């Protein structure tokens, strides 16, 4: 279970502190299905439903791909890829022997990035997982046309056997194509929005192909969501949501998410979409940014320590390192580092984190720590559930609909008009 440490934020609270009564109300709105966007709150029961309905088929498809292919090309953008990429980079950053390499495409429109991936793919045996809830998003649709053609060139009449489509249960072009061509299909449930869909086939199929134990992820998520149903200020999701809304009320309107594990980078990207798209509307919202420590202390550290004082900082810390790395002794000690002997690298990193917290808090940056037991399947599931519940509560506390994203359409409208899409104005 996640723990939230607010000790570095407390100095910035008013005497009343975070509004837990408001967090309770927001939680009740969420669980009662009485709030804005209630039709999109199915992610709360998603792990249980997936376990009952689709998990076996997801694992079987992943085994098939793992057994025959050297690569999986995952085509998707936003909520249709960030979670899977976050999980894979966090838990399985380097493919082991027999693990297919995972390529992510269709998350932009760069000709160079596409050519690069195709070059890296070379003559590898590969499968494609195309993921799009709407089935109409330009970036993945364009990439899919290109990779379908590659599949046809490589596998001829068997190309369709190498396509796995994750899309709406009934609607959209991708669904129609999947039915017409007999592609194996997985569902993005109607009541789950893209950024809340990582624990559906959207995230689970690529994760399973990469070698992540998705059954463990789902079991842990079910347990975590039960724990997060607690109606009390002890609930870590209340603590985080109420603390950040309290700080927002005091003009801290930028939140930096940081971690001392470089493998967390894409979880930061996933988190940015989750909170940015859920809360940034109606002229309100905390701007989500992310940093990688300690690397970014040498680039962004100056700004964080002494720039405008509207930043709050949330640090994800994994309590236990996966490996032990004792600092080596050197008889000459020409580099003067023998004072570190007797410590593990993870201890040195933990000390750095404490030092950074002290410095940033004294420099005027409220600090929230999210403590995760381990960087493993359970830790990942706990983080996802924690952030999703906290995001919904935080969004309701700020009075917005956390489950829509009307602002995303503006650029699309212009782009389709400029590209000459039939019917676009
Ligand atoms: O959260 C969201 O709704 C978005 O990020 C979508 O996931 C993203 O735009 C991709 O949409 P789609 O899956 O329909 O292609």
Image (cartoon, grey):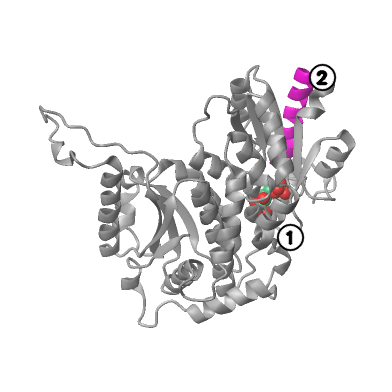
Q: Which residue is mark 1?
A: 191
Find the distance from the CA under tag 1 to the CA under tag 2.
Answer: 37 Å
Q: Position of residue 161 (x, y in %)?
A: 80, 28
Density class for disc 2 (Cα within 10 Å; few <14, some 14-19, many ≥20) is: few
In this rendering, the answer to whether 330 lies above or below 207 is: above
Point 69% across, 76% down: residue: 34
Q: Position of residue 70 (x, y in %)?
A: 63, 24
- Residue 280 figure quarter: bottom right
Horizontal side of residue 341 vs 116, given as left or right: left
Residue 280 in view in this figure: no
Nearer-the-camera pick, 13 or 416: 13
* Highlighted range, magenta: 139-156
Instruction: Indicate whether residue 150 is drawn in magenta.
Output: yes
In this rendering, the answer to whether 204 lies above or below 285 is: above
Q: Position of residue 425 (x, y in %)?
A: 79, 51
Point 55% across, 78% down: residue: 24
In this rendering, the answer to whether 147 lies above or below 256 is: above
Point 12% across, 35% down: residue: 336
Q: Position of residue 162 (x, y in %)?
A: 76, 28
Q: Which residue is mark 2?
A: 156
């Amino acid at each position: 279970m996640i723990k939230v440490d607010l000790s570095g934020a407390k100095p910035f609270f008013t005497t009343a502190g975070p509004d837990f009564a408001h967090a309770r109300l927001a939680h009740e709105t969420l669980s009662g299905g009485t709030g804005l966007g209630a039709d999109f709150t199915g992610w709360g029961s998603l792990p249980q439903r997936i376990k009952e309905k689709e998990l076996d088929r997801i694992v079987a498809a992943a085994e098939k791909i793992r057994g025959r292919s050297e690569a999986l090309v995952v085509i998707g953008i936003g909520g249709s890829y960030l979670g899977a990429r976050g999980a894979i980079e966090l838990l399985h950053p380097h493919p082991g022997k027999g693990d297919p390499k995972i390529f992510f495409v269709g998350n932009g429109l760069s000709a160079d990035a596409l050519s690069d991936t195709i070059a890296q793919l070379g003559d590898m045996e590969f499968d494609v997982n195309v993921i799009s809830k709407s089935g109409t998003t330009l970036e993945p649709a364009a990439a899919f046309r290109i990779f379908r053609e590659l599949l046809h060139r490589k596998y001829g009449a068997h190309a369709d056997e190498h396509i796995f489509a994750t899309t709406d249960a009934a609607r959209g072009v991708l669904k129609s194509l999947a039915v017409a061509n007999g592609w194996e299909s997985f569902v993005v449930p109607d009541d789950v929005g893209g950024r809340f869909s990582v624990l559906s086939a959207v995230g689970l199929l690529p994760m399973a192909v990469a070698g992540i134990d998705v059954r463990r992820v789902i079991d842990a998520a079910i347990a975590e969501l039960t724990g997060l149903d607690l109606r009390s200020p002890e609930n870590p999701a209340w603590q985080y949501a109420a603390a950040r809304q309290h700080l927002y009320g005091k003009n801290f309107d930028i939140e930096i998410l940081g971690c001392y594990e470089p493998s967390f980078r894409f979880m930061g990207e996933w988190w940015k979409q989750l909170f940015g798209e859920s809360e940034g509307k109606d002229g309100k919202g905390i701007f989500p940014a992310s940093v990688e420590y300690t690397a970014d202390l040498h680039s962004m550290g100056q700004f964080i320590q002494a720039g405008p004082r509207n930043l709050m900082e949330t640090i994800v810390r994994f309590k236990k390192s996966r490996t032990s790395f004792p600092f080596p002794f050197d008889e000459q000690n020409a580099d003067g580092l023998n004072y570190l002997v007797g410590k593990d690298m993870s201890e040195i990193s933990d000390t750095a984190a404490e030092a950074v917290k002290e410095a940033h808090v004294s420099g005027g940056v409220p600090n929230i720590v999210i403590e995760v037991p381990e960087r493993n399947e359970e830790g990942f599931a706990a983080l996802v559930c924690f952030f999703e519940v906290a995001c919904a509560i935080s969004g309701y506390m700020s009075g917005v609909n956390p489950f829509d994203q009307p602002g995303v359409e503006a650029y699309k409208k212009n782009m389709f008009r400029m590209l000459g899409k039939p019917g676009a104005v």
